[in-house]
């Protein structure tokens, strides 16, 4: 190019230019291990401190998650993590006892949380499907989701897509960040149990 002369080559309009492909978002599912609990804790605490999708107000401790993990392992209830190709935890899903009373042993309450960097990438639906499959394998009959009625539209949509039906609402039962909050309860029925689960004492 001669000095003083600009580049006179014609450039294509932006909509005709070749677009660079975004990196593929890759993930896999596996049962959670104790080594994952630090990452699980960080994901959950992000929502504790920044949202009303959980009614917890104080960040959880690693000890809390270790005790929860041990309890789920003892009861044979699934806890699943979604991981990147380098085994970074992207999100998790679990079910826990709906009640300590033994008659509730075929029912469980689910939780599903994605790390901030993993939202909006299509991970939630397959992660919830993986949890539902694990619940069937664990011989559960009913899965219950209790969802905040504020700021959780994506969670409600996710559960509806997975076949959950709304079965009830409660208003003003929570209070966080200076505002009253309600809950929406959704339920999904699974197959009849094939075997008898351990009957927990009331």
Image (cartoon, rainbow, N blue to C red):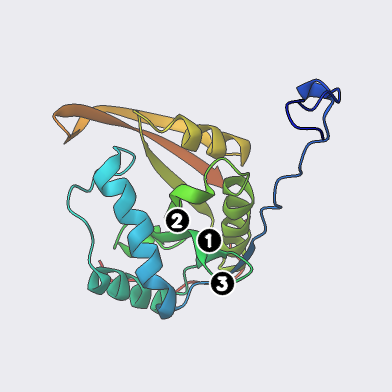
Total marks placed: 3
Q: At which x and y percent is residue 50?
A: 28, 42
Can residue 100 be seen in this snapshot?
A: yes
Q: Is mark 1 on a helix, strand or loop?
A: loop
Residue nearer the viewer, 170 or 7: 7
The residue under the point 29% across, 63% down is 100
Instruction: Determine the CA span between mark 2 and mark 3.
Output: 31 Å
Q: Residues within 10 Å of mark 2 (few under 14, many from 20)?
A: many
Classify residue 102 as left or right of residue 194.
left
Q: At which x and y percent is residue 24?
A: 71, 52
The residue under the point 73% across, 26% down is 4
Residue beneath label 1, please? 140
The residue under the point 32% across, 47% down is 47
Classify residue 78 as left or right of residue 38.
right
Q: In this view, does 168 lie above or below 59?
A: above
Q: Are marks 2 and 3 in contact (CB under 8 Å)?
A: no
Classify residue 139 as left or right of residue 179.
right
Query: Splitting the image into 4 quarters, where does residue 120 fall?
Result: top right
Residue beneath label 3, please? 87
Quadrant for the C terminus, please.
bottom left
Q: What element carries label 3?
A: loop
Q: At which x and y percent is residue 140?
A: 53, 61
Query: Splitting the image into 4 quarters, where does residue 182 fall?
Result: top left
Q: Residues within 10 Å of mark 3 (few under 14, many from 20)?
A: few
Instruction: Determine the CA span between mark 2 and mark 1.
Output: 6 Å
Residue beneath label 2, please? 107
Query: Splitting the image into 4 quarters, where does residue 135 fall?
Result: bottom right
Q: Earlier in the sequence, mark 2 or mark 1?
A: 2
């Amino acid at each position: 190019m001669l000095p003083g002369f600009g580049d006179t080559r014609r450039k294509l309009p932006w909509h005709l230019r070749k677009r660079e492909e975004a990196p593929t978002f890759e993930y896999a599912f596996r049962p959670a291990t104790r080594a994952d609990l630090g990452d699980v804790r960080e994901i959950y605490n992000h929502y504790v401190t920044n949202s009303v999708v959980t009614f917890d107000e104080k960040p959880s401790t690693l000890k809390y998650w270790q005790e929860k993990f041990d309890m789920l392992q003892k009861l044979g209830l699934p806890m699943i993590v979604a991981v990147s190709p380098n085994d970074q935890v992207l999100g998790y899903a679990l079910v826990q006892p709906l009640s300590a009373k033994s008659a509730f042993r075929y029912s469980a309450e689910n939780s599903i949380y994605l790390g901030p960097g993993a939202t909006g990438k299509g991970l939630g639906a397959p992660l919830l499907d993986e949890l539902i499959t694990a619940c069937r394998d664990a011989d559960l009959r009913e899965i219950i989701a209790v969802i905040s009625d504020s700021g959780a539209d994506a969670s409600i949509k996710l559960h509806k897509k997975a076949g959950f039906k709304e079965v009830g609402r409660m208003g003003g039962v929570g209070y966080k960040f200076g505002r009253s909050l309600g809950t929406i309860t959704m339920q999904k029925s699974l197959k009849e149990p094939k075997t008898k689960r351990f009957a927990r004492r009331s």
